[in-house]
Image (cartoon, rainbow, N blue to C red):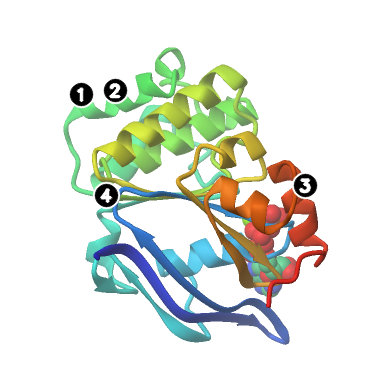
Amino acid sequence: MTYALETQSLVKQFGKLTAVAGIDLRIRTGEIYGLLGPNGSGKTTLIRLLTGILKPSGGSVTLLGEKMPNKEVMLDVGYMTQAVALYEDLSVRENVSFFASMCNVTDPERIDEIIDFVEMGDRKKSLVRNLSGGMKRRASLACALVHKPDLLLLDEPTVGIDPTLRVAFWEYFRQAANAGCTVVVSSHVMDEAQRCDRLGFIRSGKLIAEGSYEELIKRAQASSLEEAFLRFASCKVDIS
Ligand SMILES: Nc1ncnc2c1ncn2[C@@H]1O[C@H](COP(=O)(O)OP(=O)(O)OP(=O)(O)O)[C@@H](O)[C@H]1O
Ligand SMILES: [Mg+2]
């Protein structure tokens, strides 16, 4: 079995605070893997460790068969941050072009195609600072997707996105996965979690439960994923 992403005993400490407390993840190629967990449980920190932006305090990360950090591998990874990370003084198109050029994509048609996909075609000349919150998220997604990555790391990609486009985004994630792209996505939206092949529930920096949507509900003896979430989050399930 080949994995697109593996971590071994991954740990991140910020001073005395342990944000990621020994996580072993194995995510298969072409899988959509959802990260769930309460605010502050360590999802963003885990994703930042995966990208190599944060240096682990312990353990290791392997992406697409290569030990991280590795700049070459990042050319095949698309990363969408939780907080919008765009150049506010540049237009949408300039931002997407910039991220594309970092990944050696120079085809102007590809840049326009991905801007159209996120339905920003009519705002491509707008400065990012003049966009609405949801539009900034759309532009961020275009930057993460422009180079057709093999691995997508998406930190709450649909926050602030209207329902129509949210559905379109998930259809795209599924299409990408069907074509062999691996997608790791954090979310607090339970109907999005249902669209994942597998879910990992993180609490206090630990991966406390893993499985399909149905398996997690069963494991928590809950009747919905929301109820399972509440039980996992409040230690009401025996995870030993
Ligand atoms: N750079 C940092 N310095 C110090 N502490 C940090 C830093 N980044 C994150 N933390 C802490 O690590 C813990 C995990 O934060 P993280 O952002 O990973 O949570 P999260 O699961 O993504 O939460 P949310 O659902 O709110 O996005 C929190 O206690 C947070 O305050
Ligand atoms: Mg987060």
Q: Is residue 123 above or below residue 189?
A: above
State if disc 1 and disc 2 touch (CB < 8 Å).
yes
Q: Is residue 69 above or below residue 83?
A: below
Residue 87 on image: x %, y %: 48, 42
Binning the other alpha carbons within 10 Å of mark 1 as few (below 14), some (14 to 19) or many (20 upward) gives few
The three-letter code of the residue at mark 4 reads: Asp
Q: Secondary structure at mark 3?
A: helix
Query: Reading the chain from its start, which is encountered first: label 3 or label 2?
Result: 2
Point 69% across, 85% down: residue:
15
The three-letter code of the residue at mark 1 reads: Glu
Q: Nearer the viewer, mark 1 or mark 3?
A: 3
Instruction: Specify whether 60 is left or right of 137.
Output: left
Binning the other alpha carbons within 10 Å of mark 3 as few (below 14), some (14 to 19) or many (20 upward) gives some
Question: Could you give the CA–CA distance between mark 1 and mark 4, rounded to whole angstroms?
Answer: 20 Å
Instruction: Specify whether 224 is left or right of 145.
Output: right
Instruction: Specify whether 157 is left or right of 28.
Output: right
State if disc 2 and disc 3 touch (CB < 8 Å).
no
Question: Could you give the CA–CA distance between mark 3 and mark 2, rounded to whole angstroms?
Answer: 42 Å
Q: Which residue is mark 2?
A: 112
